[in-house]
Amino acid sequence: MGVKKAGEKNETRYSDWEINPENARHPIKIPRRLHPEMTVMKTMHEGKIAYLRFWNFWVRVGTPAHEPTDTFFHNYESGSKQVRNLLTAIGVPTTWPRTEKEIWKRIADVWSWLGGNVRVDGTAYSTITAADRWPSIKELATYFADHDELVWSACFSKAHLFAVLLGRVLPRWHVFIASAHHTEGGAPPTASHVYVGIYLTGRWFYLDPTAVYSSPFPSFSKRRSIGIFKTVDYQHPFSARPVPLSPLDKVPYLEK
């Protein structure tokens, strides 16, 4: 996929798409509706997939969520001065939210802050951590302290940063990193795009932080999902990676 412009000063570049071989398997097939708590959904790139009713939302049959690991969430509970200063700069409280409207506002505030304070720069992003893992919240905060901005690169770095910040200002069960298949730019249907899933008002939304430069965040009364790529199957992620301490252990269906 070539370069997609997103605002005047930032651009999104995709070149090396992730290929997830475990999802090349045959989709689960159920010939009929076996139970009122089970359904079969038609996906964009995986055929028909079985879903079960879990609490008040649907989850993929036979696909557990990933356990949070140090590779993705190193030193996640850090309370360093740099981390405190970063959260203060974003301007979102870390106390327990009292209402769902307040939760939505916190997500909106982080979204707006990312659009105004994060730049697409893969070279600079690669310097945030030298370890064989994703940047920790402390490393991100230290980079912000040194440069008065943050940087990100391809889709996973965007979703990772968005989820890392949200997990520190929301109850943990409200957020996870999602991956879904797509065929953007002629990519094979096993290619994956990474974004964020959010739980609120009895449903899961999808929010693609690639859109922070081009899509204003809706008000609580007009809340909706945000995705900008036509062939990404945002509603049917094949993978869920919750933030640490989240009880989510399944892969939810995400509504528009």
Image (cartoon, rainbow, N blue to C red):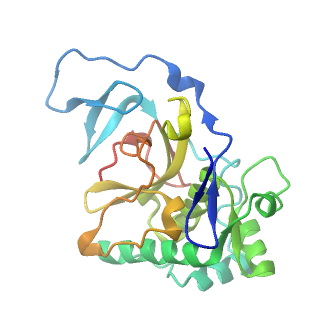
Outermost residue to the left: 36
Nearer to the camera, 130 or 12: 12
Nearer to the camera, 121 or 179: 121
Residue in the picture at 25% in, 57% down: 202
x, y percentage for residue 199?
A: 36, 58
Q: Quadrant of residue 219?
A: bottom left
x, y percentage for residue 169?
A: 50, 72
Q: Considering only vertical position in the picture, is 138 above or below 75? A: below
In screen coordinates, is 155 left or right of 206? right
Residue in the picture at 62% in, 37% down: 18
x, y percentage for residue 108?
A: 43, 74
Residue in the picture at 76% in, 61% down: 125
In screen coordinates, is 115 left or right of 79? left
Nearer to the camera, 77 or 163: 163
x, y percentage for residue 102?
A: 35, 78
User: On the rendered image, what quadrant is the N terminus found in?
Assistant: top right
Q: Considering only vertical position in the picture, is 121 above or below 25? A: below
Residue in the picture at 70% in, 47% down: 71
Q: Quadrant of residue 232?
A: top left
Q: Quadrant of residue 153?
A: bottom right
Total count of labels = 0
Q: Is residue 99 visible?
A: no
In screen coordinates, is 54 left or right of 189? left
Q: Is residue 181 visible?
A: yes
In screen coordinates, is 132 left or right of 9? right
